[in-house]
Image: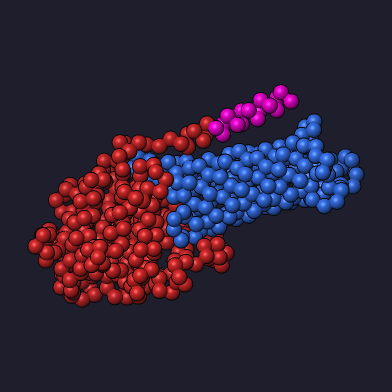
Chain colours: A red, B blue
Amino acid sequence: MNKLTNIITLLIATVIALVLSACSNITASDAASNRYAIVIGVGVSTAGNCAFADKDAYKMAALLTTKGWKLNATGYQQLISSTSSEMQTVNEPTKTNIQLAISGFNSVSSDATVLVFYSGHGYSGNGYLVPSDASTLSDCISPAMLTQWMGALPCKNKILILDSCYSGAFIDTGSSIDASPQNSNTLSGTSESGVFTTAIENLSSLISKSISEYGDPDVLTISACGSDEESYGSYDLEEGVFTYYLLQAASSGDSDGDGYVTTTEAYTYAKKRIKVKWNTSAFGEALLPHISGGTGDLVLYVNN
Amino acid sequence: MRSNCRTAKIIAVCLLLGAFPILSFAQEAKATRIATPLSFRGDFSAAGLVVPSENDLDGRPLLAAAGLSLGLGAELRAGQWIPIRSQLSYYSTGRSAVDESLFLYRAFLGWRWALETGYGFKIGKLELDLLGGGAISASEYAGTALVSAYYSLVAEPRLLIPVPLNKMPGFAITASLPFEYMWRGSTRSFATGLSAGVSIPLGKGAAQ
């Protein structure tokens, strides 16, 4: 009996040690210093102006700077076109300039993080991003194109945030299935497909994806809306609806109170607020943000 | 390659855990040639877990998370042998620790169905069961509508501590160390911890 007691005690001690090691975490002051952001706001374009895109970009740039993101490493990280007398155009967000801005980080270290934020038009039906000099579809930026530009970066950590119409087309769900519809107008009330039901209905394909060692998507992406719906700006909020709540998530989105607002936490916060505050009174302008799949997540805001 | 070697080792350990009770039962049956009584037991348990995850394919580090699970099980017993045990569990794993580049693994939660086999060893009034098998899980990433499914290997040494109750003969408290190795796409997760619960005989004449 003594031997058994000793064995059980040793096993329990081992498990406790594992638990304690699991609790280890870096402090907010140890946060990575090599985090770079590119903020794009196409308020003015050949294809037509986009209300609030410039303001979205300026506000996001200001917030990211306070949260430790570097926006002045290359001098080419804010690309904003604006007609406002209060906001100037900075580095015209043409297709070429956007590509140059991203490729400007081709020599960062593998543990760096590059974030790209875009607010502007998304081309009807396919979500292509519309730069300021775009007049035809071939002038726009497709998901494949943007994936290629960001995929060429040597860093493992990449975040893409899109506040534009049909931006769900940029979402890669990896080995998961998205139970949210691509058009929230198909929702009954505010509830999405039962998660458990979706899992059971697609069990064999989900298992085969799991077996095939499906890697996580290369870029962690959050979009303002599905691939079959538009995103909106609000004259009351004076911003894009999605960006407004994403900015608010910096102070209110830390669901576990650990000082970090992860990209998934920020997405969850923005989605909940949109469903409750915007969609319930949107009168046909409902939207539902989406997020890419994969087991990994990245911290978006560090709150010291 | 490294991932395949690790996987092979895990499979080998689980086969060993599963083979030992089968060999022991065969030996005992051959020695005694006594008809083995069949019985059923049901159980409920709760576990606190530590769940480290790693993604070699994407170059992601080993980071640990905390989790918990609640399970409802039923098993067929043939003497000391447990030919089959089925358990349905609800589990929730929190987000992992954060690495230096501010990367972490997402929180996930869902349902798991496990099928195991095993053998029990009498230690005085106690019984030590060695269980091993496989499981399928359906999960979602917390805060999202992203649904995944994956398979895993499970193993569990479990102690049955009989508690004499007049109204419920055969009632026992269980204490166990659950182990689970999960294939979640290119990410591998390993769960272990401490579990406690109750076990009761089901059906007539099942007290043992």
* Quarter placement of the C terminus of chain B: top right
Q: Nearer the viewer, residue A151 or A196?
A: A196
Q: Quadrant of residue B193?
A: top right
Q: Residue at x 69, y 53 (%)?
A: B86
Q: Quadrant of residue A201?
A: bottom right
Secondary structure mostly seen in magenta is helix
Where is A185 relative to B30, above or below? below
Q: Going by the picture, which residue comes out furthest to the top? A: A2
Q: Nearer the viewer, residue A103 or B160?
A: B160
Q: Residue at x 35, y 58 (%)?
A: A270
Residue B39 seen from this side: yes
Q: Residue at x 20, y 69 (%)?
A: A50
Q: Position of residue A197 (x, y in %)?
A: 56, 65
Where is B14 relative to A169, above or below? above
Q: Residue at x 58, y 29 (%)?
A: A13
Q: Position of residue B69 (x, y in %)?
A: 58, 47
Q: Position of residue A3 (x, y in %)?
A: 70, 24
Residue B190: in magenta span = no
Magenta stretch: give its range: A1-16
Q: Is residue B195 left or right of residue A98?
A: right
Q: Position of residue A131 (x, y in %)?
A: 20, 67
**In the rendered picture of this protein, how many numbered marks are placed on residues?**
0
Q: Nearer the viewer, residue A126 or A51?
A: A51
Residue A103 seen from this side: no
Residue A13: in magenta span = yes
